Image (cartoon, helix red, strand yellow):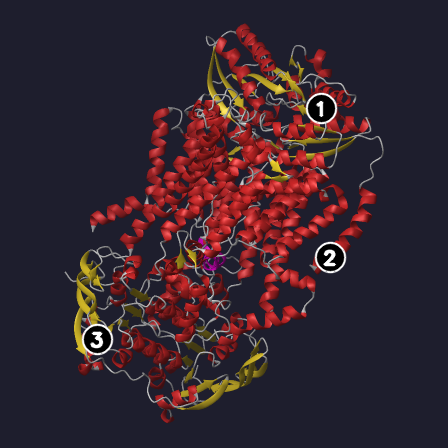
Amino acid sequence: MNGRNTKLFVLRNTPVLLFLVLLAAFGLMSDRFLTIGNFVNIVIQAAHIGIIAIGMTFVLLIGGIDLSVGANMYVVASVLGLFLKDLPLPVSFPLATLLGLAFGAVNGWIVTRLRVAAFITTLSTLFVGRGIALYFSGNKMVGFTPQILALGRASYFGVPSAIWAFAAVFAAAYVTLSQTTFGRQLYAVGADPDAAGKAGIDVRRIVFSVYCIAGVCAAIGGLVSLSQVAVASSTFGLQKEFPVIAATVLGGTSLFGGRGGVLGTVFGAVLIQTVENGLVMTNADPYLYPLVISVIIFIAVFVDSSRTSILERLERRQIRVERA
Amino acid sequence: MSAQAAPAPFFSAHGLCKSFFGVQVLHDMGFSLHPGQVLGLVGENGSGKSTTMNILGGVLPMDAGRMTIDGTEYRPRNPREAEAHGIAFIHQELNLFRNLSVAENLFIAGFPKKLRGLPFIDRARVRARTQELLAAVDLDVAPATLVSRLSQGERQLVEIAKALGANARIVIFDEPTTSLTTRETDRLFDIIGRLRRQGIAIIYISHILGDVLRLCDDILVLRDGHLVGGAPKSQMTVERMITLMVGRTIEQMFPPRDPPIELGEPVLEVRGLSQRGMVKDIGFSLRAGEVLGISGLMGAGRSELARILFGIDPCESGEVRIGGSAVPKLSPAACMAQGMAFLTEDRRAEGLMMEASIADNVALASLPRFGRNWARFIERTRLGDEVARVSSAVRIVAPDQRRTLAKNLSGGNQQKVVIGKWLLREPRVFMLDEPTRGIDVGAKYEVYKIINQLAADGAGVLVISSEIEELTGMCDRILVMAQGEIRAEFARAEFDREAILRAAMWHGSKEPA
Amino acid sequence: MQVTRRAFTVGALVAAAGSMSVMVKAEGNKTVALLFDSLVSPFWVSGIEIMREKAKAKGWTTLENISNFDDNKQFEQVKAMISRKVDGILIIQTDAKAVIPAIRAANAANIPMVHFNRPPAKSDAYSVAIQADNRKIMQDTVNFMVSQAKQMGGKYKACILIGDLGDVNAIQRRDGFFDVVNKNKDIIDVVARIATEWNADKAFAGLTNAIQANPDINFLVTSSDFLHPQIEQVLKAANKWHKKGEAGHVLFGGFDGDEGAYARLQDGYLDACGVQNLFLEVDMAFGAFEDLWAGKKPDKLLLDPGFVITQDDLMAKRDQMWGYTVWKKMQKG
Amino acid sequence: MSTMQAIAPGGTAEASRRRRGLAVRLLMSEYLVPGVTVIYFLVMWALVPAIATTETLLDILAAMLPLLVVAIGQTFVLIVAGIDLSAPSILATASVVGASMMTGDGGFALGTGVPVLVGIVAFLAVGLLIGLLNGVCTTRLGMPPFIVTLTTMMFFGGFALFYTSALTEDGSSFGDLPASFVAIGQGTVVGVPYSLGVAGVVMLVAHLVLSRTVFGQWLYAIGRNPRAAAISGVPVRRAVLWAFAISGLCAGIASVLYTGRLETGTPVLGQRILLDIVGGAVIGGVSLFGGQGRVTWTLYGVLFLSVVDKGLQLLGLDLASVFAIKGLVILCAAVLDAVRHRLMLRG
């Protein structure tokens, strides 16, 4: 029994162990890698992807998908930089976030009311969103006020603002998913929308809200990103949907709904960033970046999927108590 | 709530009518319920039982009619409103979320909150209330257990606990025992008894007429959307119910089976088959023309045995010979190559392609046989003819074999589609796991006839069933399994319900739910 | 096919109405297609705006298409422009070789083609290319920085932000950088090469990581000025954003000559910038069209020599710097 | 469920279809997407008459063919409820590897005497091998297709760049390809492109395989219910493996067409068209959840996207309008499709 427990422990924590191996490997190659400062860096850089991926987790949990998050980021950034720049931050940031929510609400409305498949809905809002933002910006780089940029560099109680934002979004999402009726109903909808309807859950409301949440997260992620990169060029947020979905799925959330959570998503986002960071720290040939990153993601998912099947076998309740 | 002192009805329905696409499926249906009453509802599939209950449960709106609860009009627009009026509907396909815990399933429609106005779930209260409700249905699992880890019977109890949690006054059971073991069924009936003593009215829908008779105070019989009979239990018999249901008399539940005078060669031989935690040292043989039954409680390893034999689940040791030749590595393809067929117990998950037509479903297992030349182009005419032949042989009732999707068929017709799929292969060995689960009397009779015909044509048939009557009615020989082993064998002459049950309960105290 | 017939009628009516209003194309006016592969940096945005203005001034009509780094899509766009029978095609391709079929198609349709800023690979097809001498300009820029470094003395840890590895200009600028630093290995040690893929996020993250790994980086070159905001942000966070002459100043070289570069030169943060002469390039390109229409055959490659602008000669040279014009406009607006 | 419902959708829908007008008839048919395409085309024709010239129509055809070939490959994978995100990187890798065999600038196969043949084999082999790799990882290692192909997309996208940088002087692409190879992508016979022949054969074969062969029926069965398929003796793993291999092979073939068209083996080939590939199939009606799809549907979807693109190119608008119009047009098609579904349900 004890041997089995150890095995279970190892298996359950494989991703963490893998992560440690990775840290050790990069640590050996660069003495600057294993420092607190660097880890803070990694988390800062993972923050915007991580935040958006948290929103994406909600969408994937109900079996949907949102390809428009990158476009949403760009719409929010260009409106903030062009039209809200004279407002004080406590006003302009909430307004920008509301705009992200509105974008998400459009997705949600089309998906729930017009009943268009999520993939196509968000594919088309991706195009429309970018079009609108480009119209506002006239293709030009959108700059931001010094206050916003200062916010990007600021630290509170020794913790950089991006990490605060990341932590806050994570905490809110975690609590929502695990501690509220909405969160639990969301898992039910993801597992079986028809059954959820029969159980008296307002499925439409949940689906709609989920796209709104994804919109809000995209907006917040966009704000974090722009406060760091300082300008939004016409490619701001372009093709962000891929790393975002990758981080979410790497974190163990199923594309088919009902399974996963935001803790894994955070882990997925940080893992990808750790590898990128490690490669820069070891001054690797830039051509090798995608090769190394993809191999590591591959190994992580491979280990995770084989682990899941072994775990299932080990944890499966024996159908009968065997006689000695 | 006062007990059954004065059995005055608190619920009544009059003149319920419903049409789909211009076809009236329910005519002038009406009944009433008083606290603590158990009302049985029987009828063939499509007779209007489910429609009635869906109207009651707020799933469908009624076209005409009137329902009242406590004298006030009741007209639910969705399941939520029905629930708010104290009506709980326990569907045949349980409405539980496997990825959530027992406690979460109980409260999914609305969790108790920590503070008014804040959305946070009061976990402690959920846990306490869950324990209370689980105790009320005698289910001994932790509230945090995931539903995916419960047995079918346990899940049923969770559904009942859910109804109790919603303060239901009427609980509707739609075919609750189809996937329960005998013991679980007994336990369910105990619980139902307890509910009625609390003054809760029960509507019980089932194809198992014996159960209905045993359990219900009053029984209503539906046919083609009309209420064709209703009487207290004392005035009903199983025969009368059947006669009312089908509109004619059926002499027997089972078609006459003349046991073959001389059995053929063994078509399936199993020796020393073992798999840890599943089955142990199984050995038996099945001969051509024989119908062999396997009885046992749920979890006794019956389905597991069949799944191992068909190569779906792995096995550690043992020898299997199909049609005289040894199959060294079991797999569905290898077994099929030797002429074996297998009807799984879960036809939705493992038998049918719901979104595909009848023809596509029937053809599925036989496709390579109709492949022509190297590219294996399908000979469509020949396949079409064969599919049509089999479909009419098993009497699938549907407007169009090519257009009608499996999901739009009744349970009985769905089962016939799966059987047809295997018959198209003309199997030498046919294993059927719960072949009549959830299908109506008429369809059952037809399935039995198909089985008889198969055996008469020289195939070996292996039937797994939880209904002992079904096995004794159908089989030439019955094996009884318990705890993964074969415990007893009965020849037709020795069939005895009591003895079979006793063998199945061998060390029965250890049966895990 | 009755549906189509009905729709056909409707379509024809709309077509008749539409063609009157939309397709007003005065006789003698020229239509020029501007095919860009992206508008990712101010260089391209200003480029297309200058082109629009100058074309308008000449009375030309412009049509635009952005290929989003997709050579195949751009080929289709060229064909679309040929279908519309434009008078000239100005193209910024992504790949020097993949554009050749497009040139051939233009040749076959007898439509002049001018490559802006990126020349095509050698082939038998005829077109005119305007290009900044990337490698040379970058060499000059870095040379200036090295001379500054030598003046100040000491050893330098260098970092370069490389562009998209699939873009010739990025490669040429990278090569220009290494031409110089490799000759000065005694004082300059390249500790970080950051592949930005012309992507601001990647640049930001890459530079942050590089500075984390080598906090003593004090020699920084970017292959395009559009990455300045990210660089400023990272250096500020690392407390390394100081003017020339202040302690801790990072020797900083840019490329393109955009408005941000001008501002940072003026403020003293940027030491040198390799400027592509955008006005000149647009004039050269449009001149090439006029020559081609006139039946002349300009050389296949026309070079914009560009120049290096530094804090020292900022006032003298700024009027040639396109970024200064944009900057001035922004100050007014 | 009652048998009444079983009869209803077929019967009454048939009756109501007869009653309704032509517009609704088009809406209800599987020709909705082509219908929308025609409407869009007519609107564009009003704005830019040049769209209705033979030349432009041939351009549209030439432009859509390679995309169609990749999208057909994708259709196979979508039918088994998978997805192949690696298609763009297969295009790129096959393009640079194939071109490196036959470039006049030191191609590896110049010495063999048949560089074009070797080159084409290389294209197809790269596609097939990456496809098989995807297939093996999903079927044998039990990893989700999304992640497997995401990683192969990243890996081979990077590999193509790496390969090119290591083998070419300027590090950007392989040019100087043999004329006979280029002809496959560009050449025409009486105005009809050769690539039409290639794509036509791919389309025909794919259509026959999916609709007429045992293998095709297996793929649909796997997409509809993999467990039922396995129990019915369908070799699920093998079939899924081949679905991925076919997707890879199709991408390899498409890469031949693209590379020939551009006369260049480039590592950035197709890097931006993933959403066009998947979107083409999905807009045509292929389900992302498996079990539903036809080659003709994919054709409609790809045709739709190609016509939309060509119209926008001809208009020569700024980027903002191009994005906005493209998005709205896709959305309109999707909304119409959703309306159709609802009408069908109502009967």
Q: Which mark is residue C327?
A: 1
- SS at mark 2? helix
Q: Nearer the viewer, residue B415 or B68?
A: B415
State the residue at coordinates (46%, 60%).
Answer: A188
Horizontal placement of C98 versus B282: left or right?
A: right
- SS at mark 1? helix
Asked whether the viewer can see residue C99, the reply is yes
Within 10 Å of the Cα at label 2, are there few (<14), some (14-19), or many (20+) other Cα atoms? few
Say if labels 1 and 2 share a chain.
yes
**Which region is colored magenta?**
A178-190
Q: Amino acid at mark 1?
A: Trp
Q: Which mark is residue B478?
A: 3
Residue, disc 2? C5
Residue B417 locus on image (x, y percent): 41, 70
In the image, is residue B16 above or below residue C309? below
Residue A50 locus on image (x, y percent): 49, 41
In the image, is residue A29 above or below residue A294? above
Majority SS type along the magenta span: helix
Q: Amino acid at mark 2?
A: Arg
**In this view, the mark in front (2 or 3):** 2
Q: Nearer the viewer, residue C103 or B116?
A: C103
Q: Amino acid at mark 3?
A: Ile
Distance from disc 1 to disc 3, alpha carbons, whole Å, reads 94 Å
Q: Residue furthest left?
A: A324
Within 10 Å of the Cα at label 1, are there few (<14), some (14-19), or many (20+) other Cα atoms? some
Output the chain of dot 1: C
Horizontal placement of D223 versus B76: left or right?
A: left
Horizontal placement of A226 versus B457: left or right?
A: right
- SS at mark 3? strand
